[in-house]
Amino acid sequence: MSLREFYRSEGEAQYLAERKEAAQQKAAHIAAKNEMLVGTVREYKGISYQMNQRGNYECLNLPPLNGLDGAFTSTQILHSIIDKMETEGTLPKSKVKGDK
């Protein structure tokens, strides 16, 4: 325990704890907002993708572990990966909202 903490009153400690919690909640809200998708949904060879707040592209409605997980920095890279997967025959099919 430091001297600063030793001489801190209970009210001051509670105030600082509330401010710390509020700052953490605000940071979590900003992080969640930054991860949101923006713009229009685009489609290439049956694969839907959309841009996120940071300018990267993410594929939508695909099964997990399909090779198109993550974010791509440009549509050119994403299209080349989709073309390569199509020639290899490993291109996943997009899930329709009704599918589970």
Image (cartoon, rainbow, N blue to C red):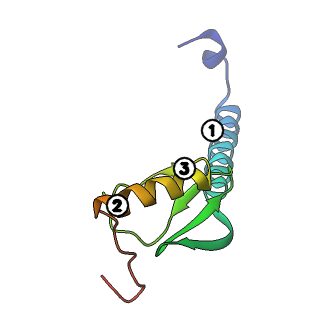
Q: Residue 77 appears at what percent x and percent y? A: 54, 49
Tag 3 secondary structure = helix
- Quadrant of res 40: bottom right
Residue type marked 3:
Ile
Q: Residue furthest bottom?
A: 98
For the point 65% across and 32% down, the residue is 13
Q: Which mark is residue 87?
A: 2
Viewer-nearest of discs 1 and 3? 3
Dot 1: within a 10 Å radius of its alpha carbon, few (fewer than 14), some, or many (20 or more) residues?
few
Return the residue at label 3. Answer: 77
Q: Nearer the viewer, residue 5 or 54?
A: 54
Residue 68 at least partly seen: no
Tag 2 secondary structure = helix
Mark earlier in primary sequence (1, 3): 1
Quarter of the image where the C terminus is located: bottom left
Tag 1 secondary structure = helix
Mark earlier in primary sequence (3, 2): 3
How far apart are labels 2 and 1 at the CA level?
57 Å
For the point 42% across and 85% down, the residue is 97
